[in-house]
Amino acid sequence: MQILPNPAKDFVDIKYTLEYNKPMPFQLFDTAGKQIITVHISNTQIGENHYILNSSTINMISGSYLLVLNSNKNFTSQKIILTK
């Protein structure tokens, strides 16, 4: 998984690779462990995919967040830093 840009101001492009063509859920948590959002991406394909996360649509403030992807075989997580 790759998140660009990071740190980010308004949006992040989440790039990830799938071995299977099935829905890909991801969750975003703040530093206190509170779940901010869960997104179920249904239009995925085998190979490289991406999703644009707009921080203003979910009222994210400046700070650190943890993005967790669940590909059914394993979990992947990465830190996102947001600066406004």
Image: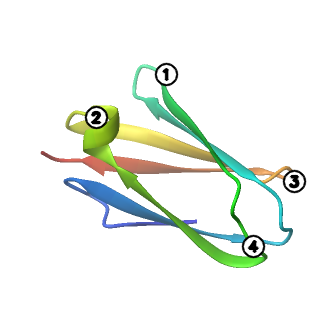
Position in image of residue 25 (x %, y %): 68, 45
Which residue matches tag 4? 45
Which residue is found at the position 83% from the left and 72% from the top? 19
Position in image of residue 8 (x %, y %): 25, 57
Say whether disc 2 or disc 3 marks the residue closer to the N-terminus: 2
Which residue matches tag 1? 33
Please, what secondary structure does the residue beneath circle 1 have? loop
Say whether disc 2 or disc 4 marks the residue closer to the N-terminus: 4
Question: As drawn, which residue projects farthest toward the front?
Answer: 43
- Disc 2 and disc 4: Cα gap in Å? 28 Å
Q: What crowding class fits label 2: few (fewer than 14 Cα within 10 Å), some (14-19), or many (20 or more)?
A: some
Which residue is found at the position 47% from the left and 19% from the top? 34
Between tags 4 and 3, which lies in front?
4
Q: What crowding class fits label 3: few (fewer than 14 Cα within 10 Å), some (14-19), or many (20 or more)?
A: few
Could you tell me the amino acid type at mark 2?
Met
Residue 70 in view? no
Q: What crowding class fits label 4: few (fewer than 14 Cα within 10 Å), some (14-19), or many (20 or more)?
A: some
Q: Nearer the viewer, residue 71 or 43?
A: 43
Which residue matches tag 3? 73
Picture layout, residue 50 above or below residue 66: below
- Disc 2 and disc 3: Cα gap in Å? 29 Å
Q: Is residue 19 left or right of residue 28?
A: right
The N terminus - image quarter:
bottom right
- Disc 4 and disc 3: Cα gap in Å? 16 Å
Say whether disc 1 or disc 4 marks the residue closer to the N-terminus: 1
Question: As drawn, which residue projects farthest toward the left?
Answer: 84
Between tags 2 and 3, which lies in front?
2
Could you tell me the amino acid type at mark 4?
Gln
When asked about the image quadrant of residue 71, the answer is bottom right
Residue 79 in view? yes
Which residue matches tag 2? 60
